[in-house]
Image (spheres, rainbow, N blue to C red):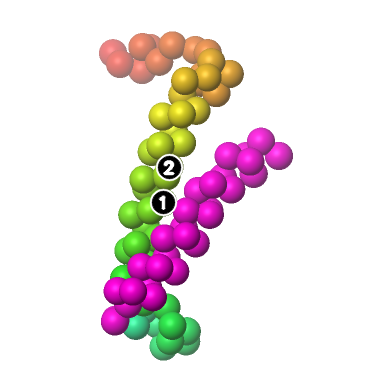
């Protein structure tokens, strides 16, 4: 349930960025099976997802219960 709550904003970002990017800038078809899918929509969705995921990671890292309690220094030998 917690994973669904955390992933829902990222999934919404994909949809919120793909549709406008594809609608306004879409010229190049992505696949013939679905002619309304464009490379521009795919790239817009990717960029939007990366931005929203980075923002959510920053926000969630501020909460102690969202971070790993173990120090990671043992991996840096």
Secondary structure found at label 1: helix
- Label 1: how many Cα within 10 Å (few below 14, some 14–19, many 20+): many
**Residue closer to the observer: 6 or 77:** 6
Whole-angstrom CA distance, mark 2 to mark 1, is 6 Å
- Residue 20: image x %, image y %? 40, 68
User: Would you say residue 39 is visible in this rendering?
Assistant: no
Residue 76 placement, left or right of 4: left
> Magenta stretch: residue 48 in it?
no
- Label 2: how many Cα within 10 Å (few below 14, some 14–19, many 20+): some
Is the C-beta separation of discs 2 and 1 under 8 Å? Answer: yes
* 34 over 24 or under it: above or below: below
- In the rendered structure, find residue 49 and report the number of the disc placed on it: 1
Q: Which residues are magenta?
A: 1-28
* 22 over 29 or under it: above or below: above
* 68 over 60 or under it: above or below: above
Residue at the (37%, 47%) spot, across then down: 50
Residue at the (47%, 60%) spot, across then down: 16
- Residue 74: image x %, image y %? 38, 12
* 59 over 39 or under it: above or below: above
- Which residue lies under the disc numbered 2? 53
């Amino acid at each position: 349930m917690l994973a669904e709550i955390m992933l829902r904003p990222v999934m919404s970002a994909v949809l919120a960025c793909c549709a406008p990017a594809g609608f306004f800038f879409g010229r190049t078809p992505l696949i013939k099976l679905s002619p309304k899918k464009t490379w521009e929509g795919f790239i817009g969705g990717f960029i939007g997802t990366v931005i929203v995921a980075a923002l959510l990671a920053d926000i969630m890292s501020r909460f102690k219960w969202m971070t790993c309690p173990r120090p990671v220094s043992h991996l840096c030998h």
